[in-house]
Image (cartoon, rainbow, N blue to C red):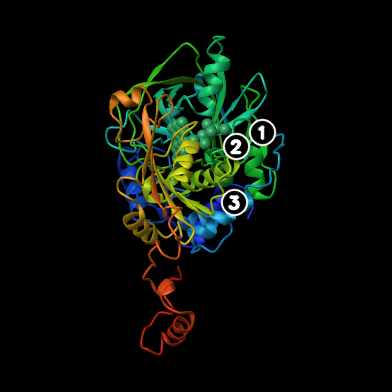
Amino acid sequence: MIWQDNREFMEALRASGDLVTVGEKVSWDLELGAISRLACERDAPAVWFKRIADYPEEHSVFANPLATWRRVAILLGLKPDASVKEIYREYERRDQSLIPPVQVSTGPCKEVVVRGDDVDVFRLPAPMLHDGDGGRYIGTWDLVVSRDPDTNWTNWGIYRFMLHGRRTLTGFPRPTSHLGKIFQERFVPKGKPMPIAIVIGADPFSHLAASATVALGTDEAALAGGMRGAPVELVRCETSDLLVPATAEIVLEAEVLPDRVSLEGPYGEYPGYRTGEMGNGILCRVNAITHRRRPILTVDATGFKDDSTTITSMTGAISIKRRLAKHGIEAADVYVPAETAVHAAVVSVPRGGPDVCRKIVEILTSRRALLSKIFVVETDVDPFDMEAVMHAFATQCHPARGIHVVQYEGRANTLTPCYSQEERLAKRGATVGFDCTWPPDWSREWDVPVRATFNCIFPEAVRQRVLRNWKAYGFDQDGGRNR
Ligand SMILES: Cc1cc2nc3c(=O)[nH]c(=O)nc-3n(C[C@H](O)[C@H](O)[C@H](O)COP(=O)(O)O)c2cc1C
Ligand SMILES: [Mn+2]
């Protein structure tokens, strides 16, 4: 599927039973957030809220587009019940080719254009998502376009934005994010405002590309095109020369002010906590809003098992695999379990040991250090099978010799809940590698214990006979899971 727009994707979700349409009037003030949050935690369908209290009926809200693996499978054109491993493989295949975007003269996102003093961001039904949030969040599942004026490279990323005033928003791009870097390095020193476009409800591949972990200089629009198998169509903004996906539901054309900071947050974040206090964010002035008729505001009910725990985990895992390969570690597989909220990874390697484990931790913490726990297993353990991973961790990781900690400052993930305020300020943190592999100097024949599982401790002929007769013995499943 190419997914011409978000509406086509929503229709596919409806057809497969992965979209619930709520016709009852709901409040933007916590009720919508609570429903959408519970839907994440219950692996429930995505939600389309058709009537929002205080807003005319042409405004609706679509929540949690990719928060379950079923929806990610549908996005990638797989069967809805495809396994996580199959989904990873399909993504890995699709993100290999880049197809540059094409510019078109106009598109649905220009159906309604509001400029200058007519702009009032409160006309959009941005929800108060969690109790205690610093305000109503409009950018939660967005795609923020910015451009480096020196190289002309355009960056896309998902960064949160909160309503501030009628024409102002405040946001929190991490200083290590590409938007944060472009702003700090190219605009702040010159005292120039930075044009941005906050795009809401573009085709789902564009948002997936914006959230993917990619190197500085990567054209995320071309990545989205590659994944779709067709170029993304872009139109020029009304008030800047930035280009935005033509079929987007809503576009907020803004500039980030170089000489202001503004209070932002706190926010119930993806690790599953409200961390921190209201702090300094960036301040943007909104110069125009363009949108489709009957615009559908897309929302991520951020928190445990939100949209990032599927897609950020998957794109992060695949980028870890490629990064390790670049540094000479051929990992057979890498899995970032959704329930770890992008804080832990499982890496399987043909041969482990302390040197390999330490090297993996060092490679994965040399730049931004998002993850703080890494399980290194051997290839006879399927990293996607958390029962097998926990078994390997509990039995193979030496409680003293198997733990490898790397500490760092200036690049830790400030949203990691276990860090103290002081550590967050200094971006100080640590990543631990759990070596769940056998020591390389142990003889496989004499020292390594034989796993007492069906697959490992019985002769082939006996296993075949048991599998063949499994149903005849009276069991109702076929062979069980094949590890
Ligand atoms: C739903 C969602 C919300 C996100 N919110 C933020 C955010 O507020 N700030 C941030 O720096 N990154 C956020 N991220 C992560 C970035 O989108 C991600 O790191 C992306 O790769 C950033 O692009 P960049 O590498 O071009 O900076 C979010 C990701 C998702 C999926
Ligand atoms: Mn980027």
- SS class of the residue under badge 2? helix
In the image, what residue occupies the spot 58% across and 45% down?
325
Choose top left, top right, bottom left or bottom right for residue 302.
top left
Residue 203 in view (yes/no): no
The picture places residue 193, in percent across and down from the top left corner, at: 55, 15
The picture places residue 246, in percent across and down from the top left corner, at: 63, 38
- Classify 10 Å Cα crowding around label 2: few (below 14), some (14-19), many (20 and above): many
Of the numbered discs 1 and 3, the one sitting upstream in the chain is 3
Point out the quarter of the image occupied by ligand 2: top right
The residue furthest bottom is 472
Quarter of the rendering occupied by the N terminus? bottom right
Give 26 or 423, whichever is nearer the viewer: 423
- Judging by the rendered image, the residue that carries numbered circle 3 is 92
Number of numbered discs overlaid on the protein picture: 3
- SS class of the residue under badge 1? strand
- Judging by the rendered image, the residue that carries numbered circle 2 is 109
Give 342 or 71, whichever is nearer the viewer: 342
